[in-house]
Structures are given as C-alpha cells and as structure tokens.
C-alpha cells in the first residue's frame, strides 16, 4: 500500500443507452497498463487506480477499497468517497 495520505481511483463509466442511441462516442481513453486517462486528444490525467467500464464492481472494491478497510481495522483513519 502506498504511503500517500490521499489516493484517487477513477472508474470510467460506460455510455448510457441514450448516449448510444444518439451516436455519442467515448471521450475518455484509458491507457493500457498505466493508471492514466486521456480526455479528448491531449489532456492526460494520472490516478492511483483507473478502472475501465467493463471491470466488475468486486474488482474495484478489492483493488481500491479493501486495503483501506484493512488499515481501518488496524486503527488507522480511512475515508472512501464515492461519487456518481
């Protein structure tokens, strides 16, 4: 586990059915093997974890949340904020 006091995980959401019907396309690209996304053609952002839309919820929990729960049970402070 990283010694950083704040870590950020991002899960890229899939297009909604309405977006698909409207012919919208993905504007976020995940770089393979790197916790980084690119928005549009040239705006890159790096995170501690990046999860593609097809990643199961269980995998997101195991990779990003479970280590925090383990540390919390050892007496450390932990916060998980989920948005969206």
Image: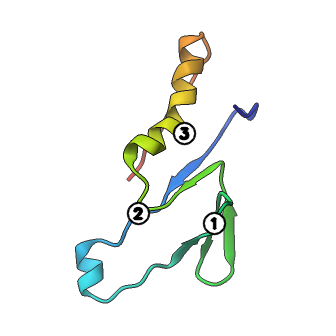
Nearest to N terminus: mark 2 or mark 3:
2
**Which residue corresponds to the image point at 59% horizontal and 10% vertical from the top-left?**
75
Q: Is residue 80 left or right of residue 18?
A: right
Q: Is residue 45 left or right of residue 69?
A: right
**Figure quadrant of residue 24:** bottom left
Residue picked out by circle 1: 32
Query: Is disc 3 placed on a helix, strand or loop?
Result: helix
Residue 65, how many percent across, how many down? 51, 34
Sequence order check, earlier mark of 2 and 1: 2
Residue at x 38%, y 46% (from the top left corner): 57
Disc 2 from disc 3: Cα separation: 16 Å
Classify 50 as above or below 57.
below
Circle 3 is placed at which residue position?
A: 64
Q: Is residue 66 shown above or below 8?
A: above
Corner quadrant of residue 26: bottom left
Q: Is residue 82 left or right of residue 45?
A: left
Label 3: how many Cα within 10 Å (few below 14, some 14–19, many 20+): some
Q: Is 53 located above or below residue 21 in the figure?
A: above
Please name the colour scheme applied to the rendered image.
rainbow
Residue at 23% from the left image edge and 78% from the top image edge: 18
């Amino acid at each position: 586990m990283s010694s950083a006091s704040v870590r950020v995980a991002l899960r890229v959401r899939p297009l909604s059915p309405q977006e698909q019907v409207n012919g919208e396309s993905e504007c976020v690209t995940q770089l393979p093997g790197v916790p980084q996304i690119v928005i549009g053609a040239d705006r890159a952002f790096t995170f501690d974890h990046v999860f593609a839309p097809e990643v199961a919820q269980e995998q997101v929990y195991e990779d990003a949340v479970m280590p925090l729960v383990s540390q919390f049970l050892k007496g450390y402070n932990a916060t998980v904020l989920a948005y969206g």
